Amino acid sequence: MSLFSTPFDPARDRALVTGAGNGIGRAIALGLVGEGVRTLFADVSAERVKTAIDASGTPDLARPCVGDLARLDACDELLATASAELGEVSHFVHSASPPRREADHALAVDRRTWQEMHAVNLDAGFHLAREIAKRLIAAKRSGSFLFLTSLHAGTPRNLPHYSTAKAGMAMLVKELAKTFGRHDIRVNALVPGAIAAGGFVADASLARHIPLGRLGEANDLVPMALTVLSNRLSGYVTGAAFVVDGGLSLTNWFEAPVLDA
């Protein structure tokens, strides 16, 4: 039997995906369900979650959870739902992130927007990963976590709340990978480029900066995400960041923002 024909163990593997209502999170959640993994679709929108689960083709493997991860109590509710619906979560994907607005540059972004971006990306990611890891360690089970970061963890984006949150996540991946590794829990990052999905609406002209000649789609990230999540395929990989951007990171097209007088 080919190694690639059985990347997961449906009898044991259980997944929790945040931001699973749309974009990259949805695509990865659907990919996991397609591999037979019982998966909790978590999102801030009940309508988006329902639509995503309806699109899965195997809704018996998909479970919904709705909540705003900017709130710590919502994170705890998500963990409780995961425990009730799935039992032990072995695979955690953190893709949730608030919408981005191009107007929120350094002189315009307000405190609430700044705090919400960090709360959902960094604070919720840390809290959820740590709590899931504690349970896996207690049960002496292996696990695999995947954080969706950004090219702008290392390159300015004119959106300081977004870039700094993603930069924090990039280091969090390394910190958790180093701490959890001895317990056979792997932690990695997936680094998308210009992906026309979720809250990102890309100008088609951006394609001229991409060596592969087109904007990305959410499904472009799924094969890499599943490979990295799979303990059978990537069991000796942790603390790594995998860029899926069509070569966009070879250039930096952003200019400094034009500020009003």
Image: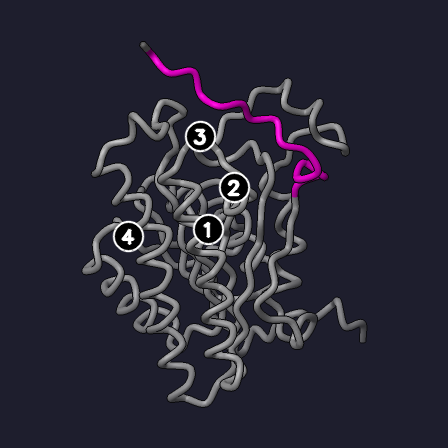
Q: Please say if the residues under marks 2 and 1 sit with CB atoms less than 8 Å apart.
A: yes
From the viewer's perspective, tell me whether residue 128 is left or right of residue 241: left
- Side (left or right) of 65 relative to 240: left
Q: CA distance from mark 1 to mark 3?
A: 14 Å
Residue 238: percent from the left, percent from the top? 59, 71
Q: Residue at x 63, y 23 (%)?
A: 206
Question: How far is mark 1 from mark 4, CA to CA?
Answer: 19 Å
Q: Position of residue 181 (x, y in %)?
A: 53, 80
Q: Is residue 217 above or below residue 229?
A: above
Q: Amino acid at mark 4?
A: Leu
Q: Is tag 2's residue or tag 1's residue first in the polypeptide sequence? A: 2
Quadrant of the image containing the N terminus: bottom right
Percent from the top left, x then y, of residue 53? 44, 49
Of the numbered discs in the image, which one, if any, rests on residue 69?
Answer: 4
* Marks 1 and 3, the one that precedes in the sequence: 3
**Which stretch appears magenta?**
245-260
Q: Which residue is at 42% across, 63% downward?
A: 16
In the displayed structure, would residue 70 be above or below residue 2? above
Amino acid type for the residue under numbered disc 3? Asn
Residue contact at pointers 2 and 3, CB within 8 angstroms: no
